[in-house]
């Protein structure tokens, strides 16, 4: 190294982001496969939107008074002078895609899901990351409260399918544009009386959007928020009926829930139903998933007047709750000795792989013993042995590493054994 070379800094992942390494990624794959299967069985189809969006999408959609838009977005100006944001959530992207492609005119059920990364510049801590992953589902053009219940039931079904039981489902109604203004006025007046107990941020929210005071995580603000009026006393008849319909449909499913009148969720677009599933032993970042109805977003985007409802599940938070037994590795390791055997090893590996069997070939020039120890190290379930004798006979040996037993046979027979063993 030359004297003036810069000191080497350790290269690590960006703060608040994390690698998902082999060993852990298998759990993610199983969770994603279970979710995809389940969502599709409820009529959802995947919709993949870009990671970057115009900043304006979230200002308009997520809401200009939310913590996400005021403090947490990764926003930059690109070389063309446009303000671009790494999506902090997915809901506005789906609504945008529908308006942009007029998916509402196709006459298909508008039920979409997506699994992918989101970005929020918040203080990283256990269960809270700057790049995290959501499973997002959204339904459009369905007004019936039974759909609200169905989506909550689907979330519950996913958690149960993965063996998660220590959760609680919270629901609320945050009203609509007809009844919320009166509530906001009452809230503003009541919050002004406890102004001194609120943090500077919440003091500002009294003027901008007093509903957002309920999002504050500071203890003093939380205590003060307990004294504020609740939305339930202000709901219009339509919102009351809708909420009663959601509860009746949940009862029909036999799904337990708790009404939490303070749960307004940190996004501006919600109307009527909001819900969350919380991890009962989850500490501070205990919301595994959250969602709600947003009947005005599409129209606010200049699109058709179509209601929406959906939820997003935090994959990191879900994975942290799982204890799935590891799936055994079914790999075959091909060991060989001599040049001809090496050629045969390559041929047989190809045959096994074509049949869908994970197959590794030894490439070092090691003795049989060293090759076996390597097969052990990589956790191979089987070792396929190709030596001079085997080549001469056209019959090969297959060792079951767990049982320690060995059989001999033609390649097709051995392949059938590997594939057939449960
Ligand atoms: P959200 O409550 O902001 O809602 O996020 C949904 C879930 O994403 C949370 O319950 C949590 O599990 C996970 N999550 C959020 N932020 C983080 C973070 N920094 N680190 C790790 N996990 C996190 C939404 O995003 C709405 N788009 C949900 C929705 C869909 N509403 C209607 N449709």
Image (cartoon, rainbow, N blue to C red):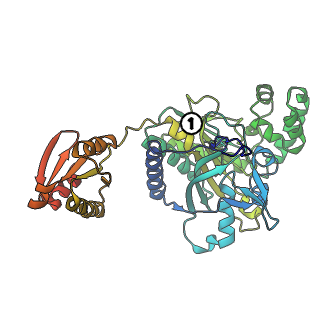
Q: Residue at x 15, y 42 (%)?
A: 405
Residue with the most extreme front position: 3
Relative placement, left or right, of 415 versus 5 is left
Residue 71 figure quarter: top right
Q: Residues within 10 Å of mark 1 (few under 14, many from 20)?
A: some
Residue 278, x across and y down, in percent: 58, 35
Residue 26, x across and y down, in percent: 43, 46
Q: Residue at x 20, y 62 (%)?
A: 340
Q: Residue at x 80, y 25 (%)?
A: 220
Relative placement, left or right, of 377 versus 37 is left
Residue 119, x across and y down, in percent: 67, 49
Residue with the most extreme left position: 393
Please determine whether, in this image, residue 7 is positioned above or below residue 346.
above
The answer as to whether callout 1 falls within 8 Å of ligand 1 is no
Residue 160 figure quarter: top left
Quarter of the N terminus within the rendering:
top right
Q: Nearer the viewer, residue 142 or 75?
A: 75
Residue position marked by numbered label 1 in the rendering: 257
Disc 1, SS: loop
Q: Nearer the viewer, residue 285 or 416?
A: 416
Question: Looking at the image, can residue 345 be seen?
Answer: yes
Question: Looking at the image, can residue 422 be seen?
Answer: no
Residue 138 figure quarter: bottom right
Relative placement, left or right, of 374 versus 316 is left
Task: Say how many tags the image has.
Answer: 1
Q: Quadrant of ligand 1?
A: top right
Q: Nearer the viewer, residue 12 or 41?
A: 12
Q: Nearer the viewer, residue 99 or 318?
A: 318
Residue 315, x across and y down, in percent: 55, 44
Please determine whether, in this image, residue 239 is positioned above or below residue 170.
below
């Amino acid at each position: 190294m030359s004297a003036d070379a810069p000191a080497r800094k350790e290269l690590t992942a960006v703060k608040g982001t994390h690698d998902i390494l082999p060993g852990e990624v298998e759990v993610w794959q199983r969770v994603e496969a279970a979710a995809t299967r389940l969502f599709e069985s409820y009529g959802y189809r995947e919709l993949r939107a870009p990671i970057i969006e115009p900043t304006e999408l979230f200002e308009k959609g997520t809401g200009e008074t939310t913590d996400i838009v005021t403090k947490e977005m990764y926003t930059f100006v690109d070389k063309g002078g446009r303000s671009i944001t790494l999506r902090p959530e997915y809901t506005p992207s789906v609504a945008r895609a529908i308006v942009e492609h007029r998916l509402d005119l196709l006459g298909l059920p508008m039920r979409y899901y997506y699994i992918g990364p989101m970005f929020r510049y918040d203080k990283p801590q256990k269960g809270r990351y700057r790049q995290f992953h959501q499973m997002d589902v959204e339904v459009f053009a369905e007004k019936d409260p039974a759909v609200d219940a169905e989506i909550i039931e689907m979330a519950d079904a996913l958690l149960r399918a993965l063996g998660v039981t220590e959760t609680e489902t919270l629901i609320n109604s945050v009203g609509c544009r007809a009844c919320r203004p009166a509530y906001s006025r009452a809230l503003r007046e009541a919050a002004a009386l406890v102004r001194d107990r609120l943090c500077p941020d919440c003091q500002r929210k009294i003027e901008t959007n007093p509903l957002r005071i309920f999002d504050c995580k500071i203890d003093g603000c939380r205590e003060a928020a307990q004294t504020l009026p609740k939305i339930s006393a202000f709901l219009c008849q339509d919102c009351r009926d809708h909420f009663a319909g959601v509860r009746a449909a949940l009862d029909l499913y036999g799904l337990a829930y708790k009404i939490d009148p303070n749960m307004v969720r940190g996004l501006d677009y919600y109307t009527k139903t909001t819900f969350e599933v919380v991890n009962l032993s989850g500490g501070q970042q205990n919301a595994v998933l959250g969602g709600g109805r947003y009947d005005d977003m599409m129209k606010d985007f200049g699109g058709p007047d179509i209601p929406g409802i959906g939820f997003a599940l935090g994959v990191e938070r879900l994975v942290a709750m799982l204890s799935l037994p590891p799936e055994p590795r079914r790999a075959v390791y091909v060991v060989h000795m001599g040049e001809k055997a090496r050629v045969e090893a390559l041929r047989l590996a190809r045959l096994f792989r074509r049949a869908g069997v994970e197959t590794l070939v030894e490439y070092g020039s090691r003795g049989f013993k060293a090759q076996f120890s390597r097969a052990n190290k990589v956790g191979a379930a089987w070792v396929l042995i190709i030596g001079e004798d085997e080549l001469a006979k056209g019959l090969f040996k297959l060792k079951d590493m767990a049982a320690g037993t060995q059989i001999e046979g033609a390649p097709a027979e051995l392949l059938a054994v590997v594939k057939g063993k449960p």
